[in-house]
Amino acid sequence: MKNKKRMILGTRKGLVVFEQDRNGNWAVSGLHFIGETVSMAYVDVRNDTWWAAQEHGHWGCKLHRSVDEGATWEEVEAPKYPEGSEVKDGEPASLKYIWAFAHGGNDHPDKLFIGTEPGGLFVSNNNGDTFEHIEGLWNHPAEKISGSEVAGIMQEFIQ
Amino acid sequence: MYYFDKIPYLHLLMPVLKFTRNLERFYPGLEPVESSKTSLQELINEANDKFPGIKDYILDEHSRLRKHVQIFIGNRMIHDRNRLPDNLNPDDEVYIMQALSGG
């Protein structure tokens, strides 16, 4: 990745990799998760790990990472709202989408943040093996909104 | 014992969990799971031991059946999607299915 100009895009029909040639033209160089909704595609520039969040409709949100630029993908456990989390009284919070992704800085090499719908912020301290829900933000009075607006707020918040 | 009396060799049977082929996209080696467990929840957990992570495809983080997934025990659709309290007989076949829509 370092010597090539590439970008990865999440789309409703898969993850698309674009690569720039010597003349500056961009062309598709790879397709992954064909036919699946990829709600978030992210490259962690610290370690060149590719991340892809998927929304399968029937089967829920899934999270994949690749350490070899998409040659192989490994599914890791998607963030989970803890028991007792509710979007409103009597309605448990359940992950719908992963919208936002950010690394935790060069001084925290294994730290990652994920923003979700409903509006939750999750942190990982082991490069995405597991994620924890940040309760402080979830319980903040300003967070008492639900829906995709909150996920948008999360994206602004962590970037 | 009632079943054993009625049907010879029933004690050799075990509940089996069968999956929609749609899940083979994610688990290429997916096959039915037989188990000596006597509850639906235990049967799903056993399937998860054999195919790690598949429980998350069927149930959400609160162990509720996902909205567009359905489970049949034989010809009977389960009714309690939140608690999955169903018990199983040795000859039960359990089906994991997904809803279809569109045109």
Image (spheres, coloured by chain):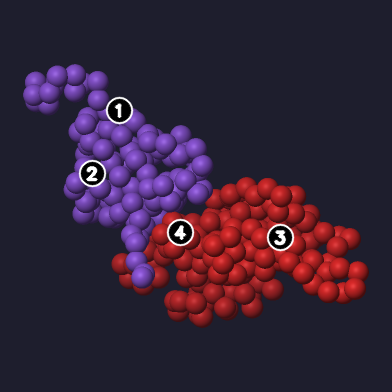
Task: Quadrant for residue A113, please give it.
Answer: bottom right
- Position of the N terminus of chain B, as image quadrant, is top left
Q: Quadrant where the C terminus of chain B lies?
A: bottom left
**What secondary structure is marked by label 4?**
loop
Q: Tell me the mark number nearer the camera, choosing from 2 and 3.
A: 3
Q: CA distance from mark 2 to mark 3?
A: 42 Å
Residue A101 spot, x, y in % from top left: 65, 66
Q: Chain of mark 2?
A: B
Between the C-alphas of marks 3 and 4, the distance is 25 Å
Relative horizontal placement of residue B75, taking residue A107 as reference (left or right): left
Q: Real-space Cα distance between discs 1 and 3?
A: 45 Å
Q: Which three-letter amino acid code belongs to the residue tagged 4?
A: Gly
Whether labels 2 and 1 share one chain: yes
Q: Mark 1 or mark 3: which is in front?
A: 3
Tell me the residue that label 1 is attached to. Answer: B36
Residue at the disc numbered 4: A60
Q: What residue is disc 2 on?
A: B73
Chain letter, colour red: A
